[in-house]
Image: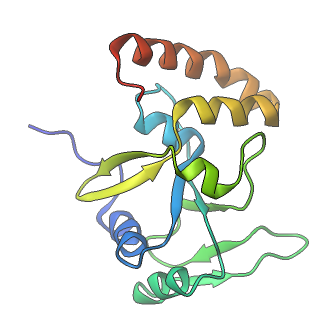
C-alpha cells in the first residue's frame, strides 16, 4: 500500500490550482528538504512565488476562495483561506540567485496527483548557510548527511 501524500486534499487542491494556472513557484525550506528524503520536520511549507502580483497567482487563489494579504512593515505577505493555512510565502531566499536562475534546476516531485517544483537540496543547504540563524546551523548536518547519502545513490540529479 502506498503511503498517503503528506498534504490534505485541500492543500493538494491549492497546489493543483497554482500548477493549473501556470503560477511559477518553488517549494523551498525544510518542507522541500523533507520531500527529497531529509529526516526533517517543519510546521509549514514555504513557497517562493515568482511574482505575487501575477494575474495567474491571483486567479489561482480566487479559484479556491483564498485571499492574498499584501505585506506591510509589520507583516509578511500571507494568504487567508481554507487550504492555504499550511503555506507561507517567501519573497527572498538568502544566499541564492534570482528565482529564474534557481528554478532552472528545480526537481519535479509528486505530491499526490500534483507535480511540483522543489528547490534542490544543495541549494537549500546554501540558503541555510547564508541565513546562518541558530535553527539553520542546527539542521545543516542533517541536510548535508542526506545530500551525501542521496549522492551515493545517484538520486541527486
Tell me: residue 81, above or below residue 63. Answer: above
- Residue name at image x 69 percent, y 81 percent: 69
- Residue name at image x 35 percent, y 24 percent: 155
Tell me: residue 119, above or below residue 60. Answer: above
- Quarter occupied by the C terminus: top left
Between 139 and 102, the residue placed more toward the observer is 102
- Residue name at image x 47 percent, y 26 percent: 38
Q: Is residue 76 left or right of residue 8?
A: right
Q: How is the image coloured?
A: rainbow
Q: Is residue 7 left or right of residue 33?
A: left
Q: Is residue 51 left or right of residue 3?
A: right
Between 11 and 59, the residue placed more toward the observer is 59
> Where in the figure is residue 97, as x and y percent of width and height?
72, 47
- Residue name at image x 51 percent, y 30 percent: 40
Between 9 and 107, the residue placed more toward the observer is 107
Quadrant of residue 128 within the rendered picture: top right
> Where in the figure is residue 109, as x and y percent of width and height?
34, 46
Regarding residue 41, the answer to whether it shows in the image is yes
> Where in the figure is residue 68, as x and y percent of width and height?
62, 82
Regarding residue 86, the answer to whether it shows in the image is no
Quadrant of residue 70 within the rendered picture: bottom right
- Quarter occupied by the N terminus: top left
Amino acid at each position: 500500500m502506498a503511503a498517503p501524500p503528506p498534504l490534505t486534499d485541500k492543500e493538494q487542491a491549492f497546489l493543483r490550482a497554482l500548477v493549473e494556472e501556470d503560477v511559477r513557484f518553488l517549494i523551498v525550506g525544510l518542507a522541500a528538504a523533507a520531500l527529497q528524503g531529509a529526516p526533517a520536520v517543519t510546521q509549514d511549507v514555504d513557497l517562493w512565488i515568482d511574482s505575487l502580483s501575477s494575474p495567474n497567482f491571483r486567479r489561482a487563489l480566487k479559484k479556491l476562495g483564498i485571499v492574498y494579504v499584501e505585506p506591510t512593515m509589520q507583516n509578511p505577505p500571507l494568504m487567508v483561506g481554507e487550504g492555504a493555512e499550511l503555506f507561507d510565502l517567501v519573497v527572498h531566499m538568502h544566499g541564492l540567485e534570482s528565482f529564474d536562475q534557481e528554478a532552472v534546476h528545480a526537481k519535479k516531485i509528486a505530491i499526490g496527483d500534483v507535480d511540483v517544483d522543489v528547490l534542490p537540496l544543495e541549494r537549500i543547504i546554501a540558503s541555510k548557510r547564508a541565513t546562518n540563524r541558530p535553527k539553520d546551523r542546527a539542521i545543516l548536518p542533517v541536510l548535508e548527511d542526506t545530500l551525501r547519502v542521496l549522492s551515493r545513490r545517484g538520486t541527486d540529479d
